[in-house]
């Protein structure tokens, strides 16, 4: 196959010759000229390729620097510690958080055996988990070892990553000292609350007898007085004392019923009781206090009010007495 440039030169030479024949000297000169032109063309292409190669290398280097800077900034902004570790356990790179957590300068960690920085608190000699392709501590008793030798609780995850056929392990960890302290404080608070609850229960249990005994005595004396011969007003006074004592005893029983206090509610009864008597008894409980203030109490009940209703007599009296006391 003839070179295009040489073929063009030969055609040009034939056109210049009168008889169309090619002179040997002219041919040699033509070949030499063509060779020089080809050599110049080759050099020009080589130069172009060299410039393109340099530009591509420069662009690739710039892209690599930009990528490295981006990765470095990203790792620096992460609050968790990050180690890049080769398959033999040597640290290749780390972020600033990792160095700060462990008390090292970033350059001091490069090439360090990762096993020096972690240990299992319950099995200090067992570091097989450090060589796992995938591991998550999940709150296990895992400790980090600082530069000064001190230990701290740590949460750790390990992942094996392969880039460009090169494998390494990525260690991502967090210092959980504050979390552990909060958990311990929570446990202590729970224990203190349980102790306080038990103390309250013990107190209520010990006080129940001391409180109920004198109150029962008051109610018993009122019963005895009601069996004696008294004037109608005196009988009404004693009846008020007894009713008030019984109501107070029922309230105290509720207070001393620890299960009701813990549940935050009191059970409502549903029993038949005399509604008119309950209203009158409630009024009698506060009549003396009203009289001291120069007030008189009177009750007006509707004629169609039923004598007996179904409900909680004690709770109704409590509500009525509270309303009257606040009036």
Image (cartoon, rainbow, N blue to C red):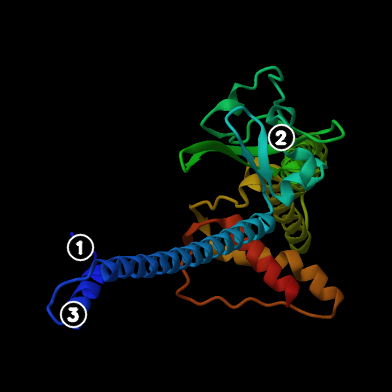
Q: Toward which corner of the image does residue 4 lie, by quadrant?
A: bottom left
Binning the other alpha carbons within 10 Å of mark 2 as few (below 14), some (14 to 19) or many (20 upward) gives some
Report the residue marked by disc 2: 111
Numbered mark located on residue 2 in the image: 1
Mark 2 or mark 3, whichever is nearer to me = 3
Where is residue 306 drawn, in percent x and y?
A: 46, 67
Residue designated by label 3: 17
What whole-number distance in Å separates the C-alpha atoms at marks 1 and 2?
62 Å
| Helix, strand or loop under label 3 | loop
Q: CA distance from mark 1 to mark 3?
A: 21 Å
Q: Nearer the viewer, residue 168 or 286?
A: 168
Up the image or down, 314 lies above or below 160; here it is below
The reply to whether the C-beta atoms of the residues labelled 2 and 3 are less than 8 Å apart is no
* Mark 1 / mark 3, whichever is N-terminal: 1
Write the residue at 69% across / 49% down. 95
Q: Secondary structure at mark 1?
A: loop
Residue 288 is left or right of residue 27, and the answer is right
| Residue at disc 2, secondary structure | loop
Distance from the alpha carbon under mark 2 to that under mark 3: 79 Å
Q: Decide: marks 1, 3 in contact (CB < 8 A)?
A: no
- The nearer-to-camera label among 1 and 3 is 3
Q: Given this view, does label 1 or label 2 mark the residue nearer the observer?
A: 1
Q: Is residue 216 visible?
A: no
Could you tell me residue 220's position as x and y percent? 76, 42
């Amino acid at each position: 196959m003839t070179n295009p440039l040489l073929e063009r030169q030969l055609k040009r030479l034939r056109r210049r010759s009168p008889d169309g024949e090619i002179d040997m000297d002219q041919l040699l000169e033509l070949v030499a000229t063509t060779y020089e032109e080809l050599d110049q063309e080759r050099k020009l292409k080589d130069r172009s390729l060299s410039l393109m190669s340099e530009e591509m290398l420069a662009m690739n280097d710039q892209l690599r620097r930009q990528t490295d800077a981006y990765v470095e900034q990203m790792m620096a902004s992460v609050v968790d510690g990050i180690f890049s570790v080769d398959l033999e356990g040597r640290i290749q790179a780390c972020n600033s958080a990792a160095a700060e957590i462990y008390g090292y300068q970033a350059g001091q960690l490069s090439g360090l055996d990762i096993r020096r920085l972690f240990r299992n608190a319950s099995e200090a000699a067992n570091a097989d988990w450090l060589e796992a392709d995938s591991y998550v501590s999940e709150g296990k008793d895992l400790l980090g070892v600082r530069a000064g030798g001190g230990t701290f609780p740590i949460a750790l995850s390990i992942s094996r990553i392969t880039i460009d056929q090169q494998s390494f392990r990525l260690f991502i960890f967090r210092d959980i000292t504050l979390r552990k302290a909060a958990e311990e404080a929570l446990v202590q608070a729970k224990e203190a609350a349980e102790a306080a609850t038990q103390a309250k229960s013990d107190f209520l249990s010990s006080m129940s007898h001391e409180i109920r005994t004198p109150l029962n005595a008051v109610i018993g004396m009122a019963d005895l007085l009601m069996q004696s011969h008294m004037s109608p007003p005196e009988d009404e006074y004693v009846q008020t004392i007894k009713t008030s004592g019984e109501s107070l005893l029922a309230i105290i029983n509720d207070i001393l019923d620890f299960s009701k206090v813990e549940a935050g509610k009191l059970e409502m009864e549903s029993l038949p009781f005399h509604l008119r008597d309950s209203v009158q008894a409630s009024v009698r409980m506060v009549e003396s206090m009203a009289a001291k203030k120069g007030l008189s109490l009177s009750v007006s009940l509707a004629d169609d009010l039923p004598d007996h209703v179904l409900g909680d007599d004690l709770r109704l009296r409590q509500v009525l007495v509270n309303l009257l006391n606040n009036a």
